[in-house]
Image (tube, rainbow, N blue to C red):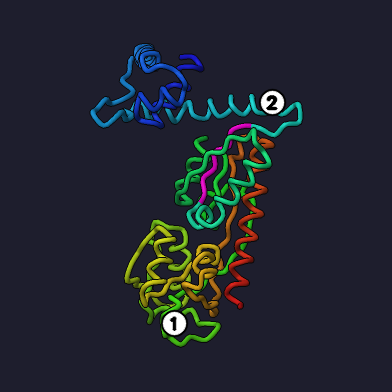
């Protein structure tokens, strides 16, 4: 097995399609198919299932992908570090972000990174905190922006911000609420919140348990922009962090109230693998995203106070 075969295999595993993978690798399809066939022959294992809808990994293929992905990441990182000897910040950065962070600041952050660091190749995905922590551990991600506390949070976690979660409702909703609402009031409201797969839901469930009741949502939706749209067009309520509400607040489509007894606070952190060095490109990306998230949270807080 050589480096070229490993790179071709991982690209095909990610794309699931020979045509797309060959295009991504800038080679012809027969060359890619030949290298994969050689790899399967050398390992004496079938690595892909071939079907009319594309290709998927066999159990042997999944095991191989888990083992060689960190190797490729390390090789790419060495290349990046050598390239940076001339003072240029460059390299490939794979980052995963929780939905609330990605939807609120990703466009602005991505544009800033592209403008300031044109030699950084940024790859971004959205996901749940637990899943992205696993991907950081296995080398599939360089950085994860997650809700905390989270299970198995490594010592490399870097705190970004603490942010209040707020009670939000549609601007046309005629309900009379004080500027500060007791958290137990939520028990009597029709709410739409994320499902139990979502880190924000766990924060809310823990707070409700502490307050002596359990949440009984009318709807459970993990796409936060969809929750905001539902709240803006119905009489349902939600509880979300300020940055997830920012766009709808700025457009005067929803209103928000602070919660007390208790106040609900979520923390956000960036996480890297403690066994891998943090490159200059990774640090540059984390600095811009952290600054943009902090600014977005402050902006949302001001919109609630107005």
User: Which residue is more in the foreground, 45 or 5?
Assistant: 5
Find disc 2 in the rendering and name its residue.
83
Main secondary structure along the magenta-highlighted residues: strand
Name the image quarter holding the C terminus: bottom right
- In the displayed structure, 148 sits above or below 142; it is below
Image position, residue 300 (x, y; %): 58, 68
* Residue numbers of the magenta segment: 91-97
Using the image, determine if residue 285 lies above or below residue 56. Answer: below
Question: Reading the chain from its start, which is encountered first: label 1 or label 2?
Answer: 2
Relative side of 51 to 223, left or right: left
Depth check, front residue: 122 or 14: 122
Please say if 306 is above or below 92: below
Q: CA distance from mark 1 to mark 2?
A: 57 Å
Label 1 SS: helix
Tell me the residue at 52%/35% (across/down).
139
| Residue 69 in view | yes
249 inside magenta stretch: no
The residue positioned 50% from the left and 53% from the top of the image is 98
- Around disc 2, counting alpha carbons within 10 Å, would you say few (fewer than 14), some (14 to 19), or many (20 or more)? some
Residue extending furthest toward the front:
251
Q: Secondary structure at mark 2?
A: helix
Residue topped by disc 1: 185
Badge nearest the viewer, 1 or 2? 2
Image disc number at residue 75: none
Residue 92: x and y in percent read 58, 33
Question: Left or right: 131 with respect to 301?
Answer: left
Q: x, y (%) of residue 9? A: 42, 23
């Amino acid at each position: 097995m050589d480096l070229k075969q490993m790179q071709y295999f991982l690209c095909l595993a990610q794309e699931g399609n020979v045509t797309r993978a060959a295009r991504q690798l800038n080679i012809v399809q027969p060359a890619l198919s030949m290298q994969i066939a050689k790899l399967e022959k050398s390992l004496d294992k079938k690595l892909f299932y071939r079907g009319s809808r594309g290709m998927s990994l066999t159990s042997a293929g999944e095991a191989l992908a888990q083992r060689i992905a960190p190797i490729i990441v390390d090789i790419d990182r060495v290349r990046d570090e050598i390239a940076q000897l001339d003072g240029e910040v460059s390299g490939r950065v794979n980052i995963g972000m929780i939905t609330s962070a990605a939807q609120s600041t990703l466009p602005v952050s991505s544009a800033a990174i592209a403008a300031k660091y044109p030699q950084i190749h940024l790859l971004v995905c959205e996901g749940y905190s637990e899943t992205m922590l696993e991907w950081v551990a296995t080398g599939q991600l360089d950085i994860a922006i997650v809700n905390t506390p989270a299970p198995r949070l490594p010592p490399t976690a870097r705190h970004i911000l603490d942010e209040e979660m707020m009670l939000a409702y549609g601007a046309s909703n005629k309900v009379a609420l004080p500027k500060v609402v007791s958290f137990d009031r939520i028990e009597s409201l029709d709410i739409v919140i994320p499902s139990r797969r979502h880190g924000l839901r766990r924060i809310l469930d823990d707070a409700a348990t502490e307050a002596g009741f359990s949440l009984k949502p009318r709807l459970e939706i993990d796409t936060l922009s969809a929750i905001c749209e539902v709240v803006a067009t119905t009489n349902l309520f939600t509880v979300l962090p300020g940055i997830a509400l920012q766009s709808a607040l700025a457009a005067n489509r929803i209103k928000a109230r602070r919660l007390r007894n208790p106040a609900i606070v979520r923390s956000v952190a960036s996480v890297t693998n403690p066994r891998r060095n943090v490159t200059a490109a990774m640090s540059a990306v984390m600095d811009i995203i952290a600054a943009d998230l902090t600014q977005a949270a402050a902006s949302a807080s001001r919109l609630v106070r107005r």
